[in-house]
Image (spheres, rainbow, N blue to C red):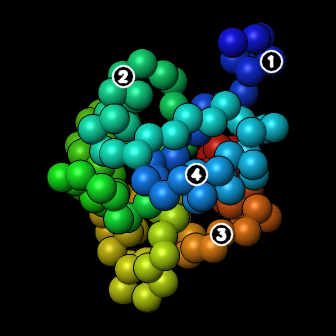
Amino acid sequence: MDRSQMDKPTILYVEDDIPSQELVRNYLEEEYRYLVSTTSGEAKRLFEKHNIRLLLVDLSLAGEEDGLSLVRYLRKRENFYSLPIIAITAHAFTNDRSTCLKSGCNDYLAKPVSRKDLVEKITQLLRV
């Protein structure tokens, strides 16, 4: 990895839908170091190896744990208690937003997410 890539904040997107992964990659790859995981377990391993500054997480994931299970797991750990987390999901009901925030997410975006909205929320959360 070159030096310019190392200086960028690392964002992890936990998403099992490849088109969604690629869309977000296209939105973020110039400004951020972008990692992707398809499962909660894989995401946990990436957290051990990388200095992840922000998490994007889909609610519906393949495997044993959904996105909110991962969020609750991270919030119980001291070193991830203040990690900015944005839920990105096809679920767009009012109670879904409330559930995400109660589970520990800082914010919520419904799919299809726009580049402007995503970058705006990331920038805001990384400044805090």
Badge 3 density bin: few <14, some 14–19, many ≥20, Cα 10 Å: some
Question: Would residue 14 appear left or right of 39 to someone viewing this image?
Answer: right
Residue 10 sits above or below residue 1 on the image: below
Badge 2 density bin: few <14, some 14–19, many ≥20, Cα 10 Å: few
The residue under label 1 is which amino acid type? Answer: Ser
Give the Cα separation between the discs numbered 1 and 2.
22 Å
The residue under label 2 is which amino acid type? Answer: Glu
For mark 1, what is the residue?
Answer: 4
Question: Would residue 98 appear left or right of 85 to someone viewing this image?
Answer: left
For mark 4, what is the residue?
Answer: 21
Which element is circle 4 on?
Answer: helix
The residue under label 3 is which amino acid type? Answer: Val
Q: Residue at x 33, y 74 (%)?
A: 99
Q: Residue at x 24, y 45 (%)?
A: 73
Which element is circle 2 on?
Answer: helix
Q: Earlier in the sequence, mark 4 or mark 2?
A: 4
Q: Quadrant of residue 33?
A: top right
Q: Which mark is residue 48?
A: 2
